[in-house]
Image: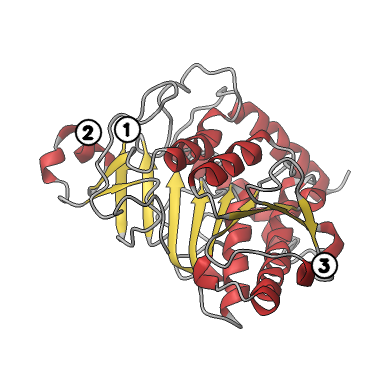
Amino acid sequence: MNFMEIWIISLFILYSVESFKLLPHTPEWYAKFQEFLEAPVREETVENIPVEKNKVAFFLFSKNNRPYPINLTEENLHNIGINADKLFVLIHGWCEGRHIQWYEDLKNALLDCYHTSYVIEVDWSDPAFDFYPNSVAATKNVGKIVGDFLITIHNKRKVSTKNMIILGHSLGGHVAGFTGKTVENVLPKLARIVGMDPAGPLFDNKTCERRLCKTDADVVQALHTDAGGMGYTDVIGTIDFYANGGYQQNGCENSSEEDCDHTRSFMYIIEAVRNPTHFVSKRCANWRIYQQHQQQCDKVKVTLGDFQNKERGTFYFATHKKPPFALESEKAKSHGGHRFSF
């Protein structure tokens, strides 16, 4: 057994143990874990693993074909009408595929609330079901494939990049970042990227060229729910939401679900899409001030599901332990009766 094999096995042991909360869930512990992860990767580079185009598939949904998605290809794009107003692109994370339940739930929420929208589910399950470092190394090329496909949609169907929003979970958040970088090389930036607890291991402390970054779209919205665990710790977007402080989620303390904190990110987003005036957040210096001295926070309030907002900074909100998670709602003063506008 070579050094890399020993390291990979150790990684999975550590991940499994951490997932079941048998190790201290603290920033100090995670810093050591991150150092352990990165040392052998620097010695044996695994970045930029090639990904064949046929390993990434695209499935199109609208209100008219919700149960029966269209498998989009460059060849059949000219035969398929895509409304130019709203296009949402969903990108899953590690060890997931198109049939993951949150895809179904978020797709339905978007189609229910934005009736003329289209949703594309990206399936990159082949490279996603691999050793974690290999899946990490594939994110750049997966993102390039997705970006090239969106460029083709723009060119063939005249869908503006300003009408495109990408929502990616975990590794999918970084795939979304590489997608944005690819699009920006040819076309105007994407309207928005929503990173749902973007992955932390092997991405923390990396430069913008190697991860999701605030410059990858006009607005890069990051939701942190498992910082110091499987999620990215630091500010990464133009606007960063730290739910319950970002490290541990209310109700996950004694959960039997190994990824409870990490998965809360897409659960909050799904609820926020259906209730865009809920999850009221405040721009504060840190979580302690939000909890104890909210009068010191900025007067600006932003809701998690308001995809029109272009505020910048670090925002905090608290949740209930169980759904519905949102504590309070804010009347939409600028929506004019519409849930969404680009």
Q: In which quarter of the image is the C terminus?
A: bottom left
Q: Can residue 210 be seen in this snapshot?
A: no
Name of the residue lying farthest toward the front: 64
- In percent of the image, x 77 and y 68: which residue is there? 77
Residue highlighted by disc 2:
291
The quarter of the picture where the N terminus appears is: top right
Q: Which is in the foreground here, disc 1 or disc 2? A: 1
In the image, 15: left or right of 130?
left
Q: Residues within 10 Å of mark 1 (few under 14, many from 20)?
A: many
Taking 317 as reference, is 48 above or below it? below
Q: Residue 76 carries which label?
A: 3
Can I make out residue 208 in this image?
Answer: yes
35 vs 316, left or right, is right
Under mark 3, the amino acid is Asn
Query: Between 239 and 42, which is closer to the camera in this rendering?
Result: 239
Residue 53, horizontal then vertical, whole percent: 83, 65
Q: Which of marks 1 and 2 is nearer the N terminus?
A: 2
Residue tagged by mark 1? 318
> Residue furthest toward the bottom?
186
Query: What secondary structure is found at the residue carrying circle 3?
Result: loop
Q: Residue 248 at what x, y percent from top left?
A: 43, 31
| Local secondary structure at mark 1 | loop
What amino acid does circle 1 point to?
Ala
Which numbered disc, 1 or 3, marks the residue closer to the eye? 3
